[in-house]
Amino acid sequence: MTASLRLWLATMLLLLLAPPALAEPLMVAADHSLTAAQYAEKGLPLPNRPWDDDDLRHAVGILQKLAAEDPLKLPRRESAASGAVFARLVAPLPLAKDATTTDDLRARIADLSGYAQPRGALALLYAKPLAGDFFFDAELVEATRVALDVNLQLLQLINRARGLRENTAAPQWLQREAGQVVYGAALTIRGALFIHAARRAFRPEWRDRLAGDLQKLVPALMAQLPETTHAEILAHLHGLMLEDPKGYADWQQLQQLMTFAGHGPPAFAKPRKAKRAHPKKK
């Protein structure tokens, strides 16, 4: 596991362990983003061409430094100044020929692995302000979706490579990659569920869009993950359900999609109702 991946996973764990969001709603972050030319002066590639994994990693690294100074300067989805830069950050991954041999699969896994860390780091960039008094809901939803998607693609490739060696021991490179991908994917799911629980940090339309992405991608990821990872993920979801009685119906729908294919128990306990205070005796 690379040092950058370890740092990303450690940061995600800090996010997961953060205290629950307060009830008071946040404000949508003001758009102080830069133009593509201004970002280029700081070292970002121009958005008028596709970015490879090195470009993306380099761009996210620069944005991390910029956000440490002023997170309001991050690229924005609907910005006239920076919309093209944000679109490049969350652009679909480059297509490749269908991997049918072990060598093809190994090459494709290595290629996609280069995108996983910066995509996760990008989601964290837009999630960190949740601890403050403003939020990036549109950007966070898009960044969360692409982080989940790259993990899904990696898991599918890992399982395809395992399938080709069904009757033989997996080579060391596949065991190593599988361990990293499974760990990263499970943690990314937990992070995405935690983000979904930050009810005060989304306008209704973006929270609905995030819920739709989770209902599509999380069950697909669970189906690719080893069953040994399911209990911890479902326990995390259950804990978030109990802390969010207002959104219980949304959580229940997601849970049912996750458990429909056998990924856990059919139902969890409902949130407890607050106890009523007994009137004092005179």
Image (cartoon, rainbow, N blue to C red):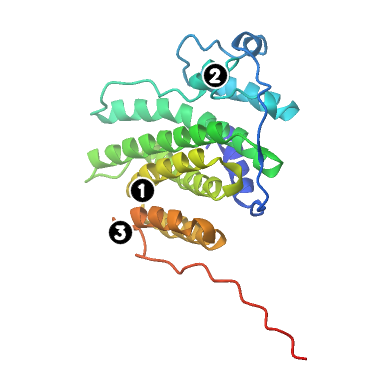
Quarter-of-image position of residue 62: top right
Taking depth in this image into account, of 242 and 204 the one nearest to the observer is 204
**Label 1 to label 3, Cα distance in Å?**
11 Å
Cβ atoms at labels 3 and 2 below 8 Å apart: no
Inspect the image, locate mark 2, and give the three-letter code of the amino acid beneath it: Gly
Within 10 angstroms of label 1, few (less than 14), some, or many (20 or more) residues? many
Mark with earlier residue (1, 2): 2
- Point out residue 71 in the picture as x, y percentages from the top left corner: 69, 29
Residue 105 in the figure: left or right of residue 134: left
Residue under label 2: 83
Outermost bottom residue: 282
Mark 3, residue position: 262
Q: Are marks 1 and 2 in contact (CB under 8 Å)?
A: no
Q: Secondary structure at mark 3?
A: loop
Mark with earlier residue (1, 3): 1
Which sits in the foreground, 266 or 61?
266
Nearest the eye: 167 or 163: 163
Residue highlighted by disc 1 = 219
Q: Quadrant of residue 30?
A: top right
